[in-house]
């Protein structure tokens, strides 16, 4: 047993004879070696993990406001940000709110408009545009319904303007929705308005019979 | 010459060899388990945030779409954390007296960004892109877990290389219809059905199995 213990002591240099005989220099060397080994094993792992570059939204102490994202210098225009098309970017033509869309609206545009509307507007204006969205139910001021006469008569550019600049208690959505998508939402709101104000005359003659049939069936059902 | 070692040391040698192997194996296993345990990977760990923001409130109960706040997730690599203005679209009018929201109001007043603590962060040598995953039908909850039930946000995946590759090797196990990508309550069909659906979608969306190192290390 004593033999085994001696072995262990020798190998690991613990206490006793082995270490005692060695000089302070050797001990210092050991510490440096061990330290270097520990650093190579653990310390250097970080050099590729954390690279000297800014990832999106990273904080910095180089600029006064602490943001690595910079605002454009006043008076300059970034590529793709030249906004000369008055109708496209302000909803106005010659300073008057316009009822024209800057590009022809196709079915795909309307579908994109519906998707965007459902993301950004339904929390307050709800899916039909009547203004009873979830956030309104939790105490947000109620917006007007899109189906009041004033908004039915409003030009398409008015909806674009409201989204771009905000309106009363409603904040601007310009930062989150691109101009073309704002026009598509405006087109979808127009579609919503039509859908809530439709009469039998709007239905193609061939489909009308089906509708009257159904509603007759329903009213018969409810009277029973 | 007399034997140096007594016979009984044979046993000692055997025990120490096999015992040593056993201990090494056990250690390796324990290390492996520890490396995958939430304690080490920091899965499920919530972080100190400037405001105790709750996805359960906002995305779950109020039903706000992920893109209302994480605006750039469809078109860029980065999902984006909402600027203070986004919070203020609602909190300028509701819960305006809540002391919990004071940092948000202060941030808006003083034009100083809120410093959210990230819960998902890859090392800088890994390239990741949200937009490709979204457009190929990988849902938020597949990677981030049931965000809509998190009172405070935590990380669901390990974000280890094996975690990414597990899906890159067999995307059919995880892909879902594009229309369901943002649905935080989507339940994938079980077992065989998911595989059948997955194989169909992999073909339809032309999903590749990307395993080349330069996909993620570029």
Image (cartoon, coloured by chain):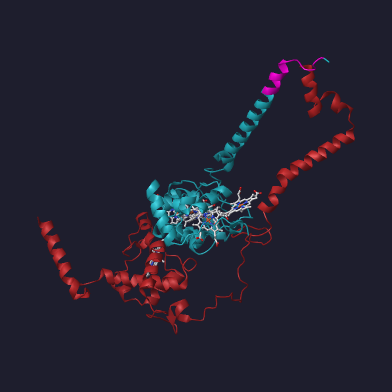
Which quadrant of the figure contains the C terminus of chain B?
A: bottom right
Q: Colour of chain B?
A: cyan
- Residue B8 in sight in this render: yes
At a point 40% along the width and 72% down the height, the residue shown is A184
Which quadrant of the figure contains the N terminus of chain B?
A: top right
Q: Is residue B73 left or right of residue A39?
A: left
- In red, which chain? A
Between B135 and A199, the residue placed more toward the observer is: B135
Query: Is residue B5 rendered magenta in the image?
Result: yes
Q: Position of residue A127 (x, y in %)?
A: 33, 62
Q: Is residue B110 above or below residue A105?
A: above
Between B23 and A113, the residue placed more toward the observer is: B23
Q: Which residues are magenta?
A: B2-14
At a point 69% along the width and 49% down the height, the residue shown is A46
Query: Is residue B166 rendered magenta in the image?
Result: no
- Residue B85 in sight in this render: no
């Amino acid at each position: 047993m004593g033999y085994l213990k001696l072995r262990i002591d020798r190998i690991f240099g613990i206490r006793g004879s082995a270490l005692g005989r060695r000089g302070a220099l050797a001990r210092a060397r050991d510490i440096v070696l061990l330290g270097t080994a520990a650093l190579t094993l653990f310390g250097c792992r970080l050099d590729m993990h954390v690279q000297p570059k800014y990832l999106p939204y990273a904080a910095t102490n180089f600029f006064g406001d602490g943001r690595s994202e910079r605002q454009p210098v006043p008076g300059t225009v970034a590529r793709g940000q030249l906004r000369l098309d008055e109708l496209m970017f302000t909803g106005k033509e010659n300073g008057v709110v316009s009822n024209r869309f800057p590009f022809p609206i196709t079915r795909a545009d309307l579908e994109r408009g519906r998707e965007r509307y459902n993301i950004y507007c339904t929390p307050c204006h709800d899916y039909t545009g009547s203004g009873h969205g979830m956030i309104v139910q939790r105490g947000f001021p109620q917006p007007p319904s899109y189906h009041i006469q004033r908004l039915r008569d409003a030009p398409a550019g008015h909806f674009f303007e409201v989204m771009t600049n905000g309106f009363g208690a409603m904040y601007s959505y310009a930062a989150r929705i691109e101009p073309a998508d704002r026009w598509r939402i405006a087109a979808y709101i127009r579609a919503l308005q039509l859908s809530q104000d439709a009469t039998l005359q709007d239905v193609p003659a061939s489909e009308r019979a089906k509708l009257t049939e159904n509603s007759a069936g329903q009213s018969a059902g409810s009277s029973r | 010459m007399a034997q140096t070692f007594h016979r009984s040391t044979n046993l000692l040698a055997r025990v120490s060899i096999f015992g040593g192997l056993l201990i090494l194996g056990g250690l390796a296993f324990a290390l492996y388990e520890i490396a995958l345990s939430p304690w080490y990977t920091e899965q499920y760990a919530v972080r100190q945030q400037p405001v105790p923001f709750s996805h359960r409130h906002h995305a779950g109960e109020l039903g706000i779409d992920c893109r209302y706040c994480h605006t750039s997730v469809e078109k860029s690599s980065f999902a984006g954390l909402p600027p203070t203005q986004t919070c203020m679209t609602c909190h300028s009018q509701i819960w305006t007296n809540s002391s919990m929201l004071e940092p948000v109001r202060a941030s808006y007043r003083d034009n100083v960004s809120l410093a959210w603590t990230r819960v998902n962060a890859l090392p800088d040598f890994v390239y990741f892109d949200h937009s490709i995953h979204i457009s190929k039908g990988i849902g938020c909850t597949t990677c981030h877990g049931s965000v809509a039930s998190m009172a405070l946000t935590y990380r669901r995946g390990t974000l280890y290389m094996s975690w990414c590759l597990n899906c890159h090797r067999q995307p059919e196990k995880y892909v879902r219809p594009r229309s369901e990508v943002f649905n935080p309550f989507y339940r994938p069909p079980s077992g065989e059905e998911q595989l059948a659906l997955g194989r169909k979608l992999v073909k339809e969306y032309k999903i590749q199995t990307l395993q080349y190192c330069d996909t993620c290390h570029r």
